[in-house]
Amino acid sequence: MRKLIFATMLFSSVFALKAQKKDFAIIPNAGIALGVLSSSAGLHAGVNSTYGLSRRLSAEGQIFVNTMSGQTGFSGRSFSESSAGFLAGLRLYFQPPTKKTRIFVNYLVGAHSIQTRYPGELPYKGIEGSSSLGLYFSVDNRIFFGSSLEGDGYLVLKAGINVRKKKTSGKS
């Protein structure tokens, strides 16, 4: 887990330094995670960073933590789960940067460290692949909200705010 955190911090630092000359956003976000195939709910917290590649396309990275608890859909067994990880991918905007409200989709892939506990059993710990497909709205490139379908079977409803002031270069 420490190696994953160190690699994520190193990658994010290099990414941030390289992005100083172009549009770059840092977006802390929080949300509610709901199980798609299980009766479960939990919390999500993350930080997304984007780097404008063109007027409608951005590279995106995400560092996140999730906690979930509930019952599995197939057996009905109770469980609790926590995970932390890093995802990277692309963000595609449907409107040009001149619009106040913009809709975008993103697709991110990566890995996360996960720990799942079932009552009366030893916890499962491991590192697994992960993915996220999201649909979001951006207002003034400042406030973001939407949802994502996570590869491990969760729908995450989240909102965030851009804490880095956008340059006015016309790109996003």
Image (cartoon, rainbow, N blue to C red):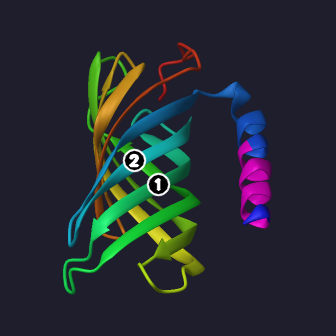
The secondary structure that most of the magenta stretch takes on is helix
Magenta span contains residue 136: no
Q: Can residue 87 be seen in this view?
A: yes
Magenta span contains residue 5: yes
Q: Is residue 52 visible?
A: no
The region drawn magenta spans 3-12
Give yes or no for contact between labels 1 and 2 (Cβ–Cβ under 8 Å).
Answer: yes
Q: What whole-number distance in Å separates the C-alpha atoms at marks 1 and 2? A: 6 Å
The label number, if any, that marks residue 43 in the structure image:
2
Foreground: 21 or 107? Answer: 107
Three-letter residue code for mark 1: Asn
The residue beneath circle 1 is 66
Q: In this view, does 73 lie to the left or right of 44?
A: left
Q: In which quarter of the image is the N terminus?
A: bottom right
Three-letter residue code for mark 2: Leu
The image quarter containing residue 80 is bottom left
Residue at 45 percent of width and 35 percent of height: 29
Local secondary structure at mark 2: strand
Residue at 53 percent of width and 62 percent of height: 83
Q: In this view, does 3 lie to the left or right of 147?
A: right
Mark 1 or mark 2: which comes first in sequence? Answer: 2
Residue at the far front in the pictured view: 120
Neighbour tally class for label 1: few under 14, some 14-19, many 20 plus, Cα within 10 Å? many
Q: In this view, does 128 lie to the left or right of 19?
A: left
Foreground: 66 or 157? Answer: 66
Residue at 54 percent of width and 50 percent of height: 64
